[in-house]
Every structure is written in structure tokens, then in C-alpha cells.
Image (cartoon, rainbow, N blue to C red):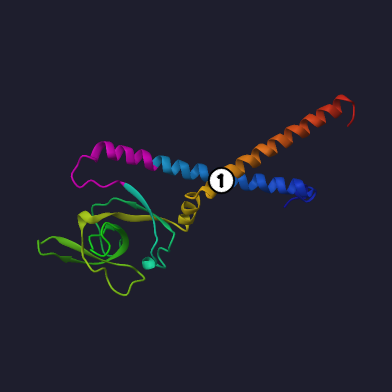
Amino acid sequence: MNDDKKEMGLFEKIKWWANFITTIVMNSIIVVLGLVAILFFLYFIDVSQNSKKEGWKPLYNAYVIVSPSMVPTIKVMDAILIKRADEFKIGDVCTYFSKDPRWPGIMITHRIIGTDINENGEKVYIFKGDANYSSDTLTVSKDQIYGKVIMKIPKIGYVQYFLSNAYGWIIAIVVPCVGIITYDIFKLYKTSKLKRKLKRGVK
């Protein structure tokens, strides 16, 4: 902290740190929204050109992890971004659509640990969670795999959970807005008061 900040009063310091934190948060939100906008643009182009094709899968998709099966690589409440791919190899972490009767219709994110050939002569993949002792019960065909994991965002699932509740939106949106409005009103009051003093010739 430089000399100017050392000379600030308590209120000025609080105001400076509030502005600093708000700037960081707002810039972060802008960056995230920019990335989301780019992904949506690519997704829209992909949908418009390929959605009518048989077996089409989205170019990008995102999921929040709720199981510890991939710890420590991916932890509970981490978010992952997956990208559609045509080729998969051993070691890839992928998300696939489960046909296991115990987990029907569930999207599972595990690692490919091997391959095999099924009764129809087709190549299938063997998956296993990094934290699991054994591989997944059923092998996985290529058309079940939605894509490879290309990015992990730690603990972002907590933010999603927080914002999905009414009180979360109130704290995240309403409270900052009220704070900004209150600060602007206070600033206008101080400016108006200073102008009245100057008008009366008081410095």
C-alpha cells in the first residue's frame, strides 16, 4: 500500500478496497461472459450446420461433477468443459452416456483405460474412475461418448448451487446493486454539500 493509501481514513480505505474488489469481480464476470458468448456462437453454428445429422452431439458441453470417482483429477463440485471428438485413446478423460441398468441415462466422466471388441465386431472402450478400484461394469461404444474433457474449473459448482437458490441471487445481484446505488447517492450528497459551501464562500 503506497503513502496515499496510508493517509486515508477508515472510510476511504473501505471505499478503495470495495472499488478494487468490485473492479476485479466485474472484469472476471466480463471475461467469463465473453468466453460463454464465444462458446454459444460456436455452438449455434454447429447446431445450424450439423444438428440434422444422425448421431449428432454438441460441439461443446459443460457439467458439474457430483461424484468423487475421479478424485484427485476432478473433485466434487468442479465443473468440466468437454469437446466433441472423433478419436479417443487410452488415458483420455471423457464424458459418456451410461447404459448401465444401475445408472440409466446418467452422464459419467471417467478415464479410458483400455479397449475391446464387442460381439458385433465393433471397437468399445473400457472406462474407470481414477478413485475407483475397478473398471466400469459395461464397455462403452463410440456413439455413447459425448466428448473429451478439455478444461476443469475448480469448485465452480458451488457458485452454481449458490445462485440456483433465491437467497443466492439476492446476495449476488440485489445487495451489490443496492450498495452501488447507496454509494452514488452518498457521493451526490457530498458533492451537493461541497457546492453549497463553496457558494457561501466556505472552503
Above or below residue 138? Residue 197 is above
Judge left or right: residue 138 versus residue 23. Answer: left
The residue depicted at 61 percent of the width and 40 percent of the height is 177
Q: Position of residue 107 (x, y in %)?
A: 30, 57
Residue 54 lies in quadrant:
top left
Judge left or right: residue 115 versus residue 66. Answer: left
Most extreme residue toward the left is: 120
Specify start and end residues of the magenta stretch as a single range: 39-59
Most extreme residue toward the bottom is: 133
Residue type at numbered disc 1? Ile
Which residue is label 1 attached to? 170
Above or below residue 115? Residue 174 is above
Q: Position of residue 95 (x, y in %)?
A: 30, 57
Label 1 SS: helix
Q: Position of residue 114 (x, y in %)?
A: 23, 67
Q: Position of residue 99 (x, y in %)?
A: 22, 60
> Does residue 193 appear in the picture of this structure?
yes
Residue 87 lies in quadrant:
bottom left
Most extreme residue toward the right is: 201
Above or below residue 172? Residue 144 is below
